[in-house]
Amino acid sequence: MMPNDPTPKISFSSARRLRIGFDVALRTALVLAIVLMANFISARFSHRFYLSSNTRLRLSPHTLNVLQSITNHITVTLYYDQSDEMFSTIKALLNEYHLADPNISVQVVDYVRNPADAQKIKEQYKLDAAVDRDLVIFDNNGNFKIAPGDALTEVKIVATGKKEDDGKLDFRRKPVAFNGEMMFTTLLLAVTNPKPFKAYYLVGDHEPSITDNTSDMGYFKFATAIAQSDIIIQPLSLTGSGNIPDDCNLLIFAGAYGQLPPLEIQKIDQYLSQGGRLFALFNEYSIKEPTGLEPVLQHWGVNIGTDRVQDLPNAVSANGQDIVVSSFVKHPVVNPLMGSRLFLILPRPVSKVNFENPSPDTPQVDELAYTGPQATLSAAPGDPPQTYPLMAAVEQKPVPGVSNPRGLTRIVVVGDSFAFGNKCIDSVDNRDFIGYAVNWLLDETQMIGGIGPKPVTEYTLVMTRQQHIAARWLLLGALPGGVLLLGGLVWLARRK
């Protein structure tokens, strides 16, 4: 063969092919190892990390406690149009419930795309085809409750800035708060608890109304917070022949002022002596117009001060009419608040009565929350500053051989009622405190907690015409062109 004759060159020697094969096998093994380790970690460890506001669907402690108590299998049917703007949020939240408790299974039935499956759901739950749409159905072996989609999101009407064909401004419904977790956990309790508790709210003594959802001082949101723990709350008048019903699990006395009729005081006193549960919230109005319930509570070891407390270092307003409370003792009512805060308005001191010679059946009284050390009383600003208690819990000790018809008495007394009205109940952890107090009073400590509405944040990207053009060229020209250029450079390098 002539030296200049073309001779076919071997592209890959045996050694090079062996190295390439080994490299491919090693890389494949590494990828498989990473996949296996990722699956192992995800199956073994369920802790999740929330890195942005868009992924912050963390379940509240109250919901997690409820899920821990559920042993039955619950089927949740998301009967929804998947094109709805809130569908993905609702579905993501329900997935969190399933991840926290595998007994919760979730199925999606899109009544627009899957009419056959939708018809089965309509027949199973007796739905009205024309009216019942966008529903979340919780089913515990035939005991079911339904959450309407319209109630899951609070909206307000806002202008879009555009005009319709007739020249009128265009408006849309903007989501501002999401009540999904609050409603879903309530329904879970409803389908798993055979007999809900009953709470009676005393009326007729200037107290705020639990049906008032418009005024700042209304107690509609307070009643909603009570109902979250599967508690039926209804008004009760003790005037005339009215008595505290036998099925009363909790009596609520909130924000009343002015002298109660002696017979009403007597009925409350008798209820407590029989092992009743009382949630009492006082305010500044009843300093000048006492209710008459104060001596009854003093008998149980709680003294309600006749002045209001100021704590300027821990106030938000310049006039010191509010207090941000962050000092709590160890007690089931406030243990979940450690590291959190409450917001109180014009609170009165609520302290423990120190009996000189307590008897064996003297109730256990614990002061729950305190001001800072620089607090003073409004009517005595010249007195040395000190720490004042603002709420207390009472628990009757069991006495051998003695049993009460209603069990052992429990009482929670708070020196403020204003902070739990419609305007302020969602301040810091006020709503949660309602759940903690009520569930301790009912001896449902595994349910202790509270859930509030979650704000819905919208992000709007505003771009000028030039920015639109630049973005279009970047997405349609620069990025694909960059990939092609890189591919061309690699091809040229390999040819050489």
Image (tube, rainbow, N blue to C red):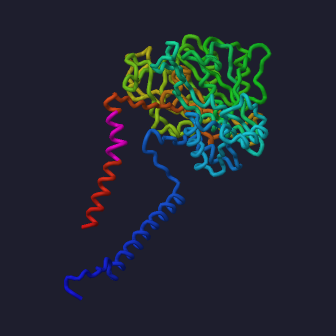
Q: Nearer the viewer, residue 407 or 224?
A: 224
Q: Position of residue 334 (x, y in %)?
A: 53, 36
Locate residue 273: give its quadrant.
top right
Along the horizontal axis of the image, is 484 left or right of 176? left
Locate residue 361: give its quadrant.
top right
Q: Position of residue 402 (x, y in %)?
A: 75, 38
The tally of labels here is 0
User: Would you place residue 427 above or below residue 106 in this image?
Assistant: above
Locate residue 20: give its quadrant.
bottom left
Along the horizontal axis of the image, is 41 left or right of 109? left
Q: Nearer the viewer, residue 139 or 363?
A: 139
Q: Nearer the viewer, residue 238 or 20?
A: 20
Along the horizontal axis of the image, is 343 left or right of 290? left
Magenta-drawn segment: 469-479
User: Would you place residue 373 above or below residue 82 in this image?
Assistant: above
Q: Quadrant of the C terminus?
A: bottom left
Q: Quadrant of the N terminus?
A: bottom left
Magenta segment includes 475: yes
Magenta segment includes 35: no
